[in-house]
Structures are given as C-alpha cells and as structure tokens.
Amino acid sequence: MIFRTLGSRGAEIPAVGLGTWEVGGRDTPDKSRDREHIETISRAIEMGYTHIDTAEYYGGGHTEELIGEAISIFSREELFITSKVWPSHLQRAALHEALDGTLQRLRTDYLDLYLIHWPNPDVTLEETLSAMSDEVQNGRVRFIGVSNFDTSLLKEAVAVSREPIVNNQVLFNIDDRLAMNELLPYCQNQGITVTAYSPLRRNAVKTSTEKLLKDLASKYSASIQQIMLSWLLGKDGVVVIPKASKLEHLRSNLEAASIVLDQVDVRMLDSLK
C-alpha cells in the first residue's frame, strides 16, 4: 500500500481506500444484503483496505452501521475511517449531534478524518469549521477537511479554519477532470490531499479514450480500470476510493497502486479531452 501525507503534521492516509456509497442503501436504509456487505468490508480489510470512506447520508446512516459491525473485530488503530457531515448539519449544535450519531453507528470513539460533505451557503464556514476544530480539540476527530469545494471556497476554508484543512474530496476520473485545472495544483502547493471519488466512472465513452486505455492496459498487462486508477495515483497527493463488491475487483483495485505509468503515457492520458 502507498500512503499520502496529510497536511504538515506527518500523519498518513492510505492512497487506495474503500468507497461505500450505496452499501446498505442510497439515501434510505436497505437491509436486504447486510450480511453480504459486512462480509465484503471484512474481507476488504483483511486484503489490505485499511482506509474506509463513508458518510452519515449513505443509506440514511445504515452504511455507517454496517461498517461499524464489520470493523468491530479489527484493531481500530490500524484503520483510517473517514466520514462526512451532511449540509443540513453544519451549524454548531447540529454538527456535534451529527458526529455523536456517526460515532455511535461506527462503534468508535473517534474519526480519523471528518469532512463537510457539500457546502451550505446558509451556514458560514467559520461556524462549521470552528465546530469541527472543537471536535479535534475534544479528541473525537483527528483531522478535518471538505468535499465538493471548488478552489475559491477551499481557499476561504483554509483562511478561516483554526485546524488545518488536510483533504478535499471531489469527483475526479478519466472523464471528469475539472480538478486538474486549478484545484489540484493549489492543493499540491498547500499540502492538501485530494480524494478522487467515483474514480472509475465513465461518461459517454469516446472512441479515442477507449482505444488509448485498451492499448495501455495491454502494454502494462493490466485492466482498463487499473490504468484509470494508476493515472490518478500517479499524481502527487491524490487518494482514490473506488467501490467494489466482488473480491476480484477489490484485489484488482488495490493492485493498481503498484502500476507505474511512464511519463509519455501519463501525458497522453492528461491530454485527453
């Protein structure tokens, strides 16, 4: 496993994490596959996925419950757990209550990383980040960050937060690459890790992109999905959180971290439109 450094404090986050969106439901609980999901998360941890990403919104909180059940048999200190607070809970009292629920569902005393899931223009960043910084001081959160923030809003968050903003989780993949223009260079300069969610998502398949991915997959004896992940992981400070339910896909995603693309191939992928 490769790691990324979080901010200036020297702590590390595994560069390949386990995404859990739609595990146990979308915005409401779906308990029809609970045992399967718990088993998959447990097997993933055994395989090397020590970084698990979730949110209070996922499955109406049920996803956190499933993770809590799965991680209960493992050493908490060996895991890196990220969760996100929903925009309607960004006021001080609501955030503290939301964190109470998240910790209870996850069966843990602390989060490694707590993110603002989406910005809420009706609540000041000062209030939200002050409340999150308090939770760092209280020992219930180790690090704080944001999600779905553009560069301008991220700069504002950095300016007003007492605790360092160490992570911004954004949509980033071979097709959705807006983050490369301004956000990623800013984050790299500031020592802020960028977590790419939906790193394997494809939009309308373009023939030129598909051909290049297939050619590179053949060249590196890899899958197209591994090439897509390797391209992201080759960028300084980038973390990926692909979701997978099959063991072979979990293993394949993890192995993508060991594939190093040469600079000519990276430039070709970078130049795709």
Image: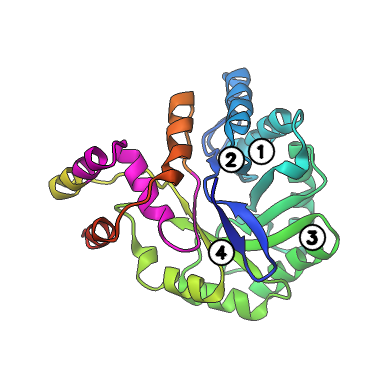
User: Is 52 situated above or below 237?
Assistant: above
Distance between mark 2 and mark 4 Cα atoms: 17 Å
Q: Are marks 1 and 2 in contact (CB under 8 Å)?
A: yes
Helix, strand or loop at disc 4? loop
Q: Which residue is mark 2?
A: 58
Q: Position of residue 135 (x, y in %)?
A: 80, 61
Residue at 24% x, 60% y is: 264
Give the crowd class for mark 2: few <14, some 14-19, many >=20 residues within 10 Å: many
* First in residue order: circle 1 vs circle 3: 1
Q: Which residue is mark 3?
A: 93
Residue type at mark 1 is Gly
Q: Which residue is mark 1?
A: 61
Helix, strand or loop at disc 3? helix
Q: Are marks 4 and 3 in contact (CB under 8 Å)?
A: no
Q: Which residue is mark 4?
A: 119
Residue at 60% x, 26% y is: 43
The answer to whether residue 194 of the structure is visible from this angle is yes
Q: Which of the two residues, 99 or 168, is positioned nearer the viewer here?
A: 168
Distance between mark 2 and mark 3 Cα atoms: 21 Å
Distance between mark 4 and mark 1 Cα atoms: 20 Å
Residue at 63% x, 57% y is: 115
Helix, strand or loop at disc 1? helix
- Residue 136 got which mark? none
Residue type at mark 3 is Ala
Q: What quarter of the picture does the C terminus occupy?
A: bottom left
Give the crowd class for mark 4: few <14, some 14-19, many >=20 residues within 10 Å: some
* First in residue order: circle 4 vs circle 1: 1
* First in residue order: circle 2 vs circle 3: 2
